[in-house]
Image: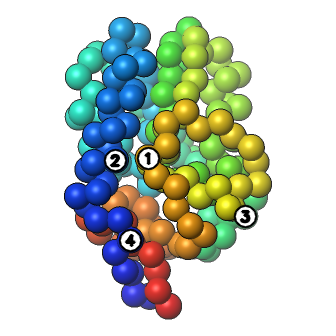
Amino acid sequence: MNPEVYISKRRINSIVNRLASEITSDYSDKKPLVIGVLKGSFVFLSDLVRKLDFPLELDFIRVASYGNSTKTSHEVSMLLAPGIPIKGRHVLLVEDIIDSGFSVDFVARLLKKQEPASLKICALLDKPSRREVNTVIDYIGMEVPDKFIVGYGLDCAEQFRNLPDICVIKE
C-alpha cells in the first residue's frame, strides 16, 4: 500500500481551528463531557481539546466494526465504555471519520440511554457517499470522497496512524 497525501497537516490545522471556534461558541458556558472514539480520533481529539479554552472533562469510548478490513462488518461491538457518568451532562462525541454511520449511531444510541442533557457529534471527516445509517453530525471538519483514508490517527489494519497528513491509499 502506498499512501498519498490528500489533506496536508497545514489544512488539517485550519479545519481543527474552525471546529474549535464553532464548539467554543456552543459549549464555553456548559463544562461539557468530551468523549473521544478510540482509536482513530485520538490525534484529532488531542489537537481539538487543546484549542478549547473553557472547562471540560474528557473520556473515551472504544468500539469496533472494521477489524482488519477496509469495509465495515455492520456489527459494532463495545470494547471500552465511558467511565464518567453522563446523565444530565452536555456531551460532545468526537469521531475521526463517519463512513457508513453504523458505529456512530451505535455509540449515540448507547449514550442517549444514559440521559445526557444534550448530545452533539463532531467528526473531522465525513464520507456521506457511504452512509447507510442516517446520523446528524453537528460539527463536520471536511467531506471526503469514497476512498480509504489513513493518517492523523486513522488506520488500515493498525498501520499509518502516525502519518501527520491525511492520505488516501493507492494500491
Q: Which amino acid lies under the numbered mark 1 shown in the image of this protein?
A: Gly
Q: Earlier in the sequence, mark 3 or mark 4?
A: 4
Proximity of marks 1 and 2: CB atoms separated by less than 8 Å = yes
> Which residue position holds label 1?
141
> Which residue position holds label 3?
73
Proximity of marks 2 and 4: CB atoms separated by less than 8 Å = no
Q: Which amino acid lies under the numbered mark 3 shown in the image of this protein?
A: Ser
Q: Which mark is residue 128?
A: none
Identity of the residue drawn at 42% across and 18% down: 26
> Which residue position holds label 4?
6
Q: CA distance from mark 1 to mark 3?
A: 25 Å
The part of the image, by quadrant, that contains residue 105 is top right
Nearer the camera: disc 1 or disc 3 = 1
Crowding at dot 2, Cα within 10 Å, few <14 / some 14-19 / many 20+, comes out as: some
Q: Which amino acid lies under the numbered mark 2 shown in the image of this protein?
A: Ile
Q: Earlier in the sequence, mark 2 or mark 4?
A: 4
> Which residue position holds label 2?
15
Q: CA distance from mark 4 to mark 1?
A: 14 Å
The part of the image, by quadrant, that contains residue 134 is top right
Q: Secondary structure at mark 2?
A: helix
* Residue 112 screen position, x and y as percent: 67, 23
Q: Is residue 126 visible from the viewing direction of this image? A: yes
Q: CA distance from mark 1 to mark 2?
A: 6 Å
Does residue 12 appear to the left or right of 123 in the view shown? left
Q: CA distance from mark 3 to mark 4?
A: 26 Å
Q: Earlier in the sequence, mark 4 or mark 1?
A: 4
Identity of the residue drawn at 23% across and 58% down: 10
